[in-house]
Amino acid sequence: MILMTKDNLFHGLVAQAANCVRCPEMCERAAVLSELNGSINARVMFIGEAPGRKGADRTRVPFSGDQSGKNFDRFLDSIGLKRSEIFITSAALCNPQKESGANRRPSANELRNCSDFLRRTIELIDPSIVVTLGGVALETLKLVHYHEFKMKDDAAKVLRWNDRMLIPLYHPSPQVLITSRHERAQLRDYKVVARAIKLMAA
Ligand code: SF4
C-alpha cells in the first residue's frame, strides 16, 4: 500500500495544474503552483487574483518580480512575516492576457474552472488563516465554500469561513494603492493579520 504524504499529494496537485488545459485562452501559460508558492505546512495562506505577466508568470513565484510583489513584500515585512512562513496562491493559477499581451482579469468561467484547484489547495495546506488579496479572490472563495462577505463591508476584518479565520485585504497593486486603499491603510490592515496570527498561536 502506498502511503500518500502531504508532499506526495502536493506534487500530484502541482502536476495536474501543470498539465491543465481547462481554459482555452490559458493553454499556453503555465500554472503558477509549485514549492515556490511557499510552505505546504504554513498556517497562513494568501490568495491573489492571478499571476501577472511581468510578475509570477515570469518568475514562477507569486507576487514577485513586479511592483505588486514589491508592495506585498513591504507589507509582509511591516509585520515581520516571512515568505517561508506562508503559502501564496491565486484564484486563477495561469496568467490571463489580452490579445495585446497585457494582463486582464480572469473571466468567470476561468475562475470557476480553477476553483477546483483552489479548493484542493486549501484542503491540502489546511491553513488556520486565509487572507484574500482583492475582490476577485474574495468572490472566488464563494465557489469553494459559500459566503456573503463584501470588500466594502468586510475588508480587514477577521471573519469565520469554512472553519478558518478569513481576512479580506485589498490587492497590493500600485493602482489599488492609488485609487482604493492607500499605503497607510494597507499597513494598518496587515496589523490585523499580525493580531490574528498571535490569536492563533495563543
Ligand atoms: S487557470 Fe486553472 S483551470 Fe484554467 S488552465 Fe490554468 S490551471 Fe487550468
Image (spheres, grey):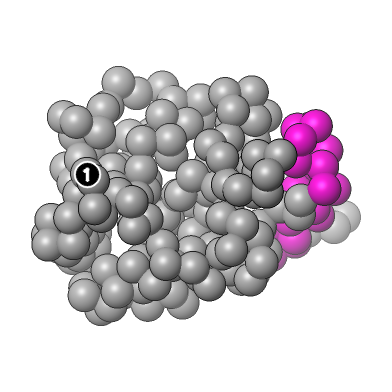
Is residue 197 shown above or below 115? Answer: below
User: Observer-nearest residue: 7 or 182?
Assistant: 182
Left or right, residue 20 beside residue 202: right
Left or right, residue 173 beside residue 22: left
Amino acid bearing label 1:
Ser
Can residue 28 be seen here? The reply is yes
Which image quadrant: the N terminus? bottom right
Which stretch appears magenta?
6-28
Magenta region, main secondary structure: helix
Question: In the rendering, at what x and y percent does residue 81 appear?
Answer: 31, 74
Residue drawn 37% across the image and 55% down it:
173
Question: In the rendering, at what x and y percent does residue 129 appear?
Answer: 33, 52
For mark 1, what is the residue?
180
Is residue 47 shown above or below 183? Answer: above
Can residue 115 be seen here? The reply is no
Residue drawn 33% across the image and 51% down it:
175
Which image quadrant: the C terminus? bottom left
User: Observer-nearest residue: 29 or 161?
Assistant: 29
Residue drawn 65% across the image and 30% down it:
110
Left or right, residue 122 beside residue 130: right
